[in-house]
Amino acid sequence: MEIQKNTIIFRITLIIVDLFLINLGYILAFLLKFGWNIPKYNFASYLSAWPWLTLSALVLFYLYQLYGSYRWRWAEVLAGLICVVFFQALIAMALSFFLRGFSFPRTVLLAAPFIQLVLLAVWRRAAWHLDRHLQNTRNIIVVGQPLEAVVLAGKLESLIGEKIKVSGLVLKDLDDPELYELDSFEVTGEDIAAPFGILKQWPVLGEVSYISECLEAVKPDQVFICSNLPQEYKAEVVYACAADDTKVYLVPDLYEIMLVQSRLDQVDDVPVFSIGRLGISEEFRAIKRLTDIFLSLCAIIITAPVSILVSAAIKLDSPGPVLYRQNRLTLQGKQFFLYKFRTMVRDAEQESGPVMASENDPRVTRVGRLLRAARIDEIPQLLNVLKGDMSIVGPRPERPFFVSKLVKETPEYSFRMNVKSGITGLAQIAGRYSTSAENKLKYDLLYTKTYSPAKDLAILFQTVKVVLMKDKAS
């Protein structure tokens, strides 16, 4: 209870200091410009506008999830701070334009973001370490089938640091031969940058049918259930944890994602869950389309100088066209030609046929590697958005060859085409370059199931942060 109280106090302190430093950045920029003799007219206009500046900063901090927890890596926190300062500067410029009394000199508007970023980075670095120190190490157990349980256990320990300790695994089918092959099995996929472990790293506590005994023996703080565990076993684990008052985290499978945001209803005296459609309503489609047209037109105009420079760089770097055109699938499986700046050598798939791009793909040109890292190669897709083939936000469009293959492996894959494809999406901001196709599909279906214009706006802001992080840009 004492630790929880300290955490709440820490969060409140974080908000107060963040907002103080944002405003201190403006004041220091004034002092840098005028010294101690700041003209009253200029400073009075700042004082009249500071509530709006403070409110906008608070919204941006929350939008970039900077009041989350120690689980964020420092690189993610820093990328979020850069985005906050950048958009805060744009808001300050907009206020100075629309509110004539808001008279900030240009030098103040230009200097304030750099000062704010330095102040916030120093403060947040110290706060980040303190936040991690305030958290207790949580002992957990992972329940599932062998391979997925090993992957999840390693991910929890390696990506979150020392604040989670896997006390053991509870597995289904202990007599499965696959289990005994794991002594030399290296897990290299599932969003993980490097192999992290083998089964002998964690003790096997027992079979799922003995979950109550395992909980009694270990007394974990939390239990994580893998998605591939059959439903009847998941129910058994959840019931046992409820009886033991242990918190449960469930990695959802595709069926459970369909139940998200279901509504409790009643038919006569029978309670029922009303499961919403997996798609976007007609009203929201109209709003989304109007937003797409407006944003794509603005973005095409703003990025025109960059597009001209990129076109010249591509021509000078390697022979071939500037734009690359490829057949993709969008809403209800409709085919269209997707436009991108060419990032690979000409005729890259002439001999190999369709091949998924990899992180260090040798077919990518020198300029192409830079364009991909900054996502500049996606700019021509704004034309697809304007034409109506795509949306700004939505599941990434895939090629027919791979779609047919993925649908055979996972029939639910076809559901992601219940909405129009997009330039960016939930899978792009929540996952990483190496995130598995299954997890990306889960994010795409979650986006479709929980769509709202506000979610689109949040994804757009988060996309800016993703571009700044190499391991998340894809």
Image (spheres, grey):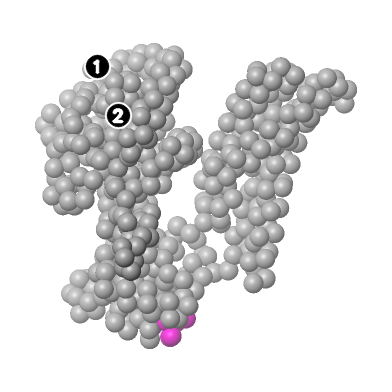
Q: Nearer the viewer, residue 174 or 380?
A: 380
Circle 2 sits on which residue? 390
- State the residue lying farthest toward the front: 268
Taking 74 as reference, is 220 left or right?
A: left
**Residue 201 visible in the current orientation:** no
Depicted 232 relative to depicted 31: above or below:
below
**Residue 213 visible in the current orientation:** yes
Q: Nearer the viewer, residue 269 or 306?
A: 269
- Image coordinates for residue 356, horizontal then vertical, percent: 22, 39
Give the amino acid type for the residue marked by disc 1 in the picture.
Answer: Pro
Cα distance in 3D space between marks 2 and 1: 23 Å
Residue in the picture at 54% in, 47% down: 65
Q: Which residues are magenta?
A: 214-219
Q: Residues within 10 Å of mark 1 (few under 14, many from 20)?
A: some
Q: Is residue 216 magenta?
A: yes
Circle 1 sits on which residue? 321
Q: State the SS at label 2.
A: loop
